[in-house]
């Protein structure tokens, strides 16, 4: 294990009806006037936005609102949010939704605290050191989908227009002050979105689990427990969307998969996410669906760089490959992973995702490695990335 510093200050209010505490939590974390930010129709239709507004009003929190965040959140709405936040002198941004709403909120929080400047903090793989974000308004979250883990993460991913580049900002300053997590709110998700969330949180663990760092036994064991839980409880929520206990396990798993509890003290990979973000930028597909296509292809391409680790994954997560060689176990594990994604109804190929082989040069170009490599367990250059996109097309 390598040395690390870990700061994960998010306050969690977890359980049925917890959204009624939202106003009180905004107050507790210093908010008096909030920008209430949300997505399309789902949170309005379910009555959640109404309940959150009531909670804000009863805690004497003033608010202005901005809905309309699209999946793969767009920079134009962030700009509108920053103008609204500055014009109304808000001191808090409240996100009600999933990763896209939270990430849009984080971008607005940066812009509102830096005289409108936020975009320069969103960079790609070409930059080795992310620009430090000097200030950001406090962000609070009412989570409606277990997936991206943004409710406790250091990151925000925004689709920058007009170039259509999906780029990320990061830093502890972006960790939300609180996250209200009521698993019941996730029962209205369409099965496809539930499945995308499962794939995304599983991928967040893989990005940390597949590491060149040795002797990280505790975090390896945490990762494996989380991955097994996502598979077993994921099957339950897919079979019965109203299974509260399974929804609760999945919701908490999504947070623990990405607040970096499992990533400390080790080199992390993140190649699959880099490769995927180009797909969701170009095709506007769901991030989890893109990962379902990329992750198995990436595993197939890199597994020989540490066959024993891939064999351990196969044995400890999917219970396959007992009594066979590490190479056979590794391949069986990748096949089991692929079969699990298929059982969720997720795409596995470019064709199923709606991506095109002819676009591979564009995808490689916009990833913009600029001579750098991508990934930890096996550093990938442009030719490697191109080969992985080709495997996705197979
Ligand atoms: O807009 P509405 O109508 O709310 O519909 C949303 C949206 O269409 C719907 N939805 C959410 N909660 C619902 C619901 N529908 C019914 N009932 C509910 N309770 O789900 C759709 C997808 O929402 P979105 O927020 O896009 O999903 P997700 O949480 O998967 O977020 C994906 C975004 O997060 C980024 C991704 O790249 C993508 O842009 N990521 C952010 C990360 C971070 N900040 O740390 C890390 C991730 O790796 C990821 O990159
Ligand atoms: Zn992700």
Image (tube, grey):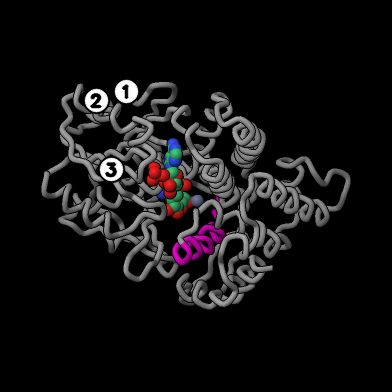
Which percent across, then down, holds residue 74? 33, 58
Q: Secondary structure at mark 1?
A: helix
Asked if the residues shown at circle 1 and circle 3 are in contact, with their CB atoms under 8 angstroms apart, the answer is no
Disc on res. 20: 1
- How many numbered marks does the figure carry? 3
Q: CA distance from mark 3 to mark 2?
A: 15 Å
Residue indicated by mark 3 = 37
Which percent across, then down, holds residue 270? 53, 57
The answer to whether residue 349 is above or below residue 83 is below
Q: CA distance from mark 1 to mark 3?
A: 17 Å
Q: Is residue 273 magenta?
A: yes
Residue stretch in magenta: 265-283
Which percent across, then down, holds residue 37? 28, 43
Seen at 30% across and 59% down, the residue is: 75
Q: Residues within 10 Å of mark 3 (few under 14, many from 20)?
A: many
Q: Earlier in the sequence, mark 1 or mark 2?
A: 1
């Amino acid at each position: 294990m390598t040395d690390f510093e870990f700061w994960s200050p998010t306050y969690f209010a977890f359980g049925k009806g917890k959204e009624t505490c939202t106003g009180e939590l905004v107050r507790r974390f210093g908010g008096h006037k909030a920008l209430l930010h949300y997505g399309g129709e789902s949170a309005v239709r379910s009555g959640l936005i109404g309940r959150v507004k009531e909670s804000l009003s009863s805690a004497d929190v003033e608010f202005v609102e901005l809905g309309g965040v699209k999946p793969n959140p767009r920079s134009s709405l962030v700009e509108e949010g920053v103008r609204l936040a500055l014009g109304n002198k808000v001191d808090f941004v409240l996100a009600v939704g999933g990763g896209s709403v939270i990430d849009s909120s984080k971008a607005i929080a940066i812009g509102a605290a830096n005289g409108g400047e936020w975009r320069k903090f969103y960079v790609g793989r070409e930059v080795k050191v992310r620009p430090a974000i000097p200030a950001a308004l406090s962000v609070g979250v009412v989570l409606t989908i277990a997936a991206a883990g943004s409710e406790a993460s250091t990151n925000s991913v925004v689709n920058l227009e007009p170039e259509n580049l999906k780029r990320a900002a990061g830093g502890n300053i972006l960790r939300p002050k609180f996250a209200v997590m009521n698993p019941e709110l996730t029962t209205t998700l369409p099965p496809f979105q539930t499945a995308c969330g499962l794939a995304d949180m599983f991928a967040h663990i893989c990005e940390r689990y597949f590491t060149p760092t040795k002797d990280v036994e505790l975090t390896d064991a945490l990762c494996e427990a989380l991955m097994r839980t996502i598979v077993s409880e994921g099957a339950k929520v897919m079979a019965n969307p109203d299974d509260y206990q399974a929804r609760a396990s999945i919701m908490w798993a999504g947070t623990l998969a990405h607040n970096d509890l499992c990533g400390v003290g080790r080199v992390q990979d993140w190649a699959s996410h880099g490769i995927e973000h180009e797909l969701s930028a170009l095709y506007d597909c769901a991030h989890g669906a893109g990962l379902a296509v990329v992750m198995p292809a990436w595993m197939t391409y890199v597994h020989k760089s540490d066959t024993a680790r891939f064999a351990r994954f196969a044995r400890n997560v999917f219970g396959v490959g007992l009594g066979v060689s590490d190479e056979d176990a590794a391949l069986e594990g990748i096949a089991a992973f692929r079969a699990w994604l298929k059982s969720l109804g997720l795409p596995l190929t470019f064709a199923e995702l709606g991506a095109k082989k002819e676009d591979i040069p564009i995808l490689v170009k916009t990833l913009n490695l600029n001579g750098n490599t991508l990934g930890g367990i096996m550093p990938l250059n442009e030719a490697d990335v191109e080969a992985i996109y080709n495997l996705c097309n197979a």
